[in-house]
């Protein structure tokens, strides 16, 4: 369980990330550390990254896809079955996704 001050600090960093403002490396590492342990923080991070991408997009269909939350936050994470190994593609998943 996160304290309210930690939660507010995380939200402040994510707000800056979503707007494309500068974020220190130490802050990014902190966010990713919490995102690896907490699904809620991971969702907040994904949404912040997606909002950052949406702000740069001029296509209406791209905005719709981002707003419906049916896309990846990382445009480089698209799986290609002809070139990629499925096991390697999922190797970067957060620890809370791992099998029990």
Image (tube, helix red, strand yellow):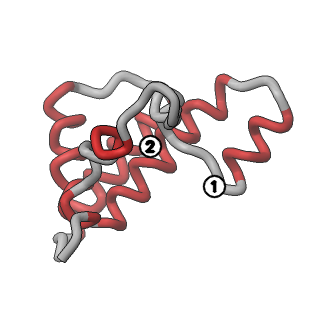
Towards the viewer: 12 or 64: 64
Residue drawn at point x = 65 percent, y = 30 percent = 55
- Element under disc 1: loop
Please give the residue where the numbered disc 2 appears in the rendered image. 15
Q: Residue at x 36, y 36 (%)?
A: 85
The answer to which of 2 and 45 lies nearer the viewer is 45
Q: Quadrant of residue 24?
A: top left
Left or right, residue 5 beside residue 12: left
| Residues at marks 1 and 2, CA–CA distance in whole angstroms | 18 Å
Image position of 16 with respect to 24: above or below: below
* Residue 67 location (% of width, % of height): 70, 51
Q: Position of residue 51 (x, y in %)?
A: 58, 40
Q: Which residue is mark 1?
A: 69
In which quadrant of the rendered image does the C terminus lie? bottom left
Q: Secondary structure at mark 2?
A: helix
The quadrant where residue 22 appears = top left
Few, some or many C-alpha atoms within 10 Å of disc 1 (few <14, some 14-19, many ≥20)? few
């Amino acid at each position: 369980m996160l304290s309210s001050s930690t939660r507010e600090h995380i939200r402040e960093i994510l707000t800056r990330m979503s707007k494309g403002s500068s974020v220190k490396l130490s802050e990014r590492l902190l966010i990713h550390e919490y995102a690896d342990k907490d699904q809620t923080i991971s969702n907040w991070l994904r949404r912040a990254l997606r909002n950052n991408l949406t702000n740069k997009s001029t296509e209406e269909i791209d905005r719709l896809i981002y707003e419906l939350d049916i896309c990846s936050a990382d445009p480089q994470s698209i799986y290609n079955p002809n070139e990629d190994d499925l096991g390697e593609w999922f190797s970067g998943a957060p620890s809370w996704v791992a099998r029990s």
